[in-house]
Image: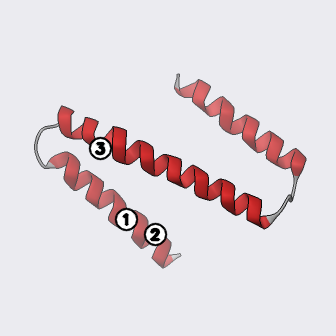
Amino acid sequence: MTALSGVTTGMGAFFGAIIGNISKELIGFSLAFAAGAMLYIVSCELIPESNKIYKGRFSSFGNILGITLGILAKVLT
């Protein structure tokens, strides 16, 4: 299943290379849509599921650590 999800990434990269530089507005909109979809999946599906499976504070600590490291990576680059 993981390999199948990677196929769509390769197909998207292929079509993106063919289409080339469409417009910066369309690319920005597409990236914003993808980021919103990922935030929805994480906040509505993954976090509650991890809290249900791993009862306690460990999953919450991992989520907070991941968010913090992501912010630091963005700020430092």
Q: Which tag, 1 or 3, sits closer to the chain's start? A: 3
Residue in the picture at 49% in, 71% down: 74
Task: Find the residue positioned furthest to the top.
Answer: 1
Q: Is residue 67 above or below residue 45?
A: below
Residue 43, percent from left and from top: 35, 48
Residue marked by disc 3: 47
Q: Identify the amino acid type marked 1.
A: Leu
Disc 1 is placed on an element classified as: helix
**CA gap, disc 3 and disc 2:** 22 Å
Disc 3 is placed on an element classified as: helix
Residue 67, percent from left and from top: 35, 61
Q: Marks 1 and 2: in contact by CB < 8 Å?
A: yes
Residue marked by disc 2: 73
Residue 4's disc number: none
Q: Is residue 42 left or right of residue 51?
A: right
Residue marked by disc 1: 69
Marks 1, 3: nearer the viewer: 3
Residue in the picture at 78% in, 66% down: 24
Q: Is residue 30 above or below residue 13?
A: below
Disc 2 is placed on an element classified as: helix
